[in-house]
Amino acid sequence: MAKKFTASSWQLKPDAKYNSKLVAKFVNCLMLDGKKSIAFKVFYDAMDIIAGKIKDTPPLEVFEQAIANVKPMLEVRSKRVGGASYQVPMQVRPKRQQSLGFRWILAAARGKKGKPMSVRLASEFMDAYRKEGAAMTTRENVHRMAEANKAFAHFAW
């Protein structure tokens, strides 16, 4: 009889080079068309570029800090009250913070054109590490929207 896999029995394995589950998760988001080996190559090349440019900090630390810097604390969600829709600021759950951070960094890297993906990804990681760049701009815009709509916070559910 075949073993059934459930969400609780399946575990993400850490990557081989850094032994980090965060890296494995990020590579799964980076992957296109099921080509994981190419995604790992792009990620590791980006880490090598970071290691060459930022000498005093290990590249894994730059990656982790970049993700932490991009994670949003607040976001706005639409809520219908009566006949009107309000943009209600709400706290973001940790799992969603991480997935939004990944998504914004990847969108920013994919938005740059004319260079290999590993170079674009490395530059986006370094920008996010220094709290600048397109992914940080997205985060600041989300926070600004939440701040502007905090008058509707009492509608949070």
Image: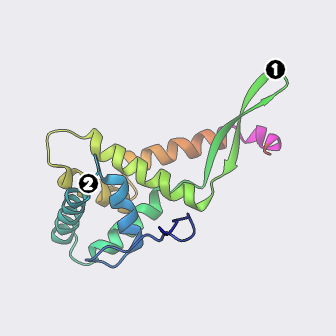
Q: Label 2 crowding class (10 Å Cα cut-off): few <14, some 14-19, many 20+? A: many
State which region is magenta. Answer: 148-155
Q: Name the spot of residue 9 as percent of width and height, x first.
A: 54, 71
Residue 113: % across, % down: 19, 38
Task: Tell me which numbered mark, 2 or 1, is placed earlier along the sequence.
Answer: 1
Identify the residue at the far top of this view: 83
Q: How many marks?
A: 2
Image coords of residue 27 (percent x, y): 32, 60
Determine if residue 133 is in view: no
Question: Which residue is denoted by mark 2 in the rendering?
Answer: 121
- Amino acid beneath label 2: Leu
Secondary structure at numbered mark 2: helix
User: At x 24% / y 62%, what residue is drawn?
Assistant: 40
Disc 1 secondary structure class: loop
Which SS does the magenta portion mostly show?
Answer: helix
> Residue 44 occupies which quadrant of the picture?
bottom left
In the depicted structure, whether residue 80 falls above or below residue 16: above
Give left or right: position of 152 versus 135.
right
Camera-side residue: 18 or 84? 18
Q: Is residue 55 above or below residue 38?
A: below
Residue at mark 1: 83
Residue drawn where x is 34% and y is 79% of the image = 19
Asked whether disc 2 touches disc 1, contact meaning CB atoms under 8 Å apart, the reply is no
Amino acid type, callout 1: Gly
